[in-house]
């Protein structure tokens, strides 16, 4: 058995290691044990997205928690950031989300939050891994009256909707504003439409009928073609696409053009700067952000820091450096004044608020940041050796970097959640980025594919 935790919890194909019922049972036991104290049973929230395998894993987690004397609270389908909120709101010890985010339906995953609403530290994940993989819990299971219980609390969706609505300024109104939502047949399919309806918007929703296998299927933040068409067809002011577990947002402007996470960050950071709320004048993004983001930060008078890829690393750097806004080009955005984790609905509300405050259409606001030509190619790989130790690839990267000079950059890295190598090139033109990214991707394929 190998390592369980990756860059964002545990993830893999459902019913294959590590996403097996036995491992979920072990995670439930380990968390209940970790948060148990003298005279206190651990209380743990369990939520999920709409994947078919969610039922299987939910039951296994519940069994693991109750076998260690813990209380499990099953809240059903809810966005990942909703679980973080409910964990805090209900004063639970931990929250577990059953989701593989933007991955296809056959995958699943487990993300864990502490009672403070933040994802668990690497150290705590290592403790959980050790307890499970070294079978340290078998002799500690509860018996008799010490066995735990499971509950299904009511009204949890309503609590979360009130919470996210309160992040939208009370002096603004969406009344009469036409908005198209793509809920990816995922965890936001109920709460996102209800939130925007209650704020007065004229809401049109696509991909809102989950059946267990259509989550993220040609829809949501990864596939915006149908959302673009619907925005143009209905004359909407904006289209908002969430991913399967609701922690990402990609927007479509009124002209049917996709607006990236980088552009949304610039728009929202600039509003915070104008209002004197951009703490330490700092925006945090990742090394994957477009070069244009760095240029725009300088133009609008705030600093920029690039973290490692992954929303947990963005958050770590935000907390360390005292920033209130950060995120990823792919749509994870953290507004620390409102929440402890990335939340697609909160990000959407801040973006709509920015449009109303500025009195400008999204296409105009998006022009605040010029996007440098960028090409990203994902290559399936069998293994993940250190890139510097693959001589042909390392030499090719150096050569491309030399030829681009200051007019571009190269980033070759492995996915933290899939057997995939990401080859990203930015440069002065589409032709140049296409040429170099293809060359490097072909070398990745031949050397480690």
Image (cartoon, rainbow, N blue to C red):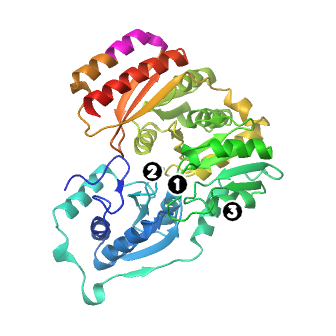
Q: Which of marks 3 and 1 is nearer the N terminus?
A: 3
SS at mark 2 in the image: loop
**Are there few (<14), some (14-19), or many (20+) residues within 10 Å of tag 3?**
some
Residue drawn 39% across and 67% down?
A: 93
In the rendered view, does 280 fall on the left or right side of 276?
left
Is 390 placed above or below 237 here?
above
Residues at marks 2 and 1, CA–CA distance in whole angstroms: 8 Å
SS at mark 1 in the image: loop
CB within 8 Å, label 2 to label 1: yes
In the rendered view, does 111 fall on the left or right side of 23?
right
Main SS, magenta residues: helix
Foreground pick, 157 / 395: 395
Magenta-tinted stretch:
398-407
Which residue has dot 3 on it?
A: 194
Decide whether residue 269 is among the magenta residues. no
Decide whether residue 400 is among the magenta residues. yes
Residue drawn 46% across and 73% down?
A: 74
Foreground pick, 136 / 421: 421
**Are there few (<14), some (14-19), or many (20+) residues within 10 Å of tag 1?**
many
Is 373 placed above or below 125 here?
above
Residue drawn 51% across and 65% down?
A: 86
Q: Can residue 350 be seen in this view?
A: no
Residue 326 lies, in percent from the top left, at 52, 39
Q: Which of marks 2 and 1 is nearer the N terminus?
A: 2
Residue 364: which quarter of the image? Answer: top right
Which residue has dot 1 on it?
A: 244
């Amino acid at each position: 058995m190998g390592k369980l935790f990756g860059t964002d919890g545990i993830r893999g194909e459902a019913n294959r290691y590590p996403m097996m019922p036995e491992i979920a049972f072990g995670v439930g036991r380990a968390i209940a044990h970790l948060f148990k104290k003298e005279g206190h049973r651990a209380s743990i929230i369990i939520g999920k997205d709409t994947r078919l395998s969610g039922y299987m894993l939910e039951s296994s987690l519940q069994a693991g928690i109750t076998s260690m004397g813990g209380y499990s609270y099953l809240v059903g389908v809810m966005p990942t950031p909703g679980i973080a909120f409910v964990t805090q709101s209900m004063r639970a010890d931990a929250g577990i989300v059953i989701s593989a985010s933007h991955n296809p339906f056959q995958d699943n995953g487990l993300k864990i939050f502490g009672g403070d609403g933040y994802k668990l530290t690497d150290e705590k994940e290592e403790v959980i891994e050790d307890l499970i993989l070294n079978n340290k819990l078998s002799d500690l299971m509860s018996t008799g009256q010490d066995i735990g219980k499971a509950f299904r609390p009511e009204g949890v969706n309503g609590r979360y909707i009130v919470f996210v609505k309160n992040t939208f300024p009370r002096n603004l109104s969406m009344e009469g504003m036409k908005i198209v939502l793509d809920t990816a047949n995922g965890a936001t399919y109920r709460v996102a439409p209800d939130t925007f309806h209650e704020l007065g918007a004229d809401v049109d929703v696509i991909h809102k009928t989950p059946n267990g296998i259509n989550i993220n299927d040609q829809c949501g933040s990864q596939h915006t073609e149908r959302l673009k068409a619907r925005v143009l067809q209905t004359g909407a002011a904006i289209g908002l696409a969430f991913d399967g577990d609701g922690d990402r947002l990609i927007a479509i402007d009124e002209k049917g053009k996709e607006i990236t996470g980088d552009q949304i960050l610039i728009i929202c950071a600039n509003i915070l700067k104008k209002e004197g709320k951009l703490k330490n004048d700092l925006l945090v993004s990742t090394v994957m952000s477009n070069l244009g983001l760095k240029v725009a930060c300088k133009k609008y008078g705030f600093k920029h820091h690039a973290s490692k890829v992954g929303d947990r690393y963005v958050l770590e750097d935000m907390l360390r450096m005292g920033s209130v806004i950060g995120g990823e080009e792919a749509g994870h955005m953290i507004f620390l004044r409102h929440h402890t984790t990335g939340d697609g609905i909160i990000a959407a509300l801040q973006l709509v608020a920015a449009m109303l405050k500025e009195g400008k259409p999204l296409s105009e606001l998006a022009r605040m940041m010029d996007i440098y030509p960028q090409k990203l190619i994902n290559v399936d790989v069998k293994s993940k050796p250190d890139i510097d130790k693959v001589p042909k690839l390392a030499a090719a990267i150096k050569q491309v970097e030399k030829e681009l000079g200051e007019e571009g950059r190269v980033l070759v890295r492995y996915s933290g959640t899939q057997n995939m190598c990401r080859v990203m090139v930015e440069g002065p033109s589409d032709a140049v980025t296409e040429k170099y990214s293809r060359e490097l991707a072909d070398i990745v394929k031949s050397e480690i594919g």
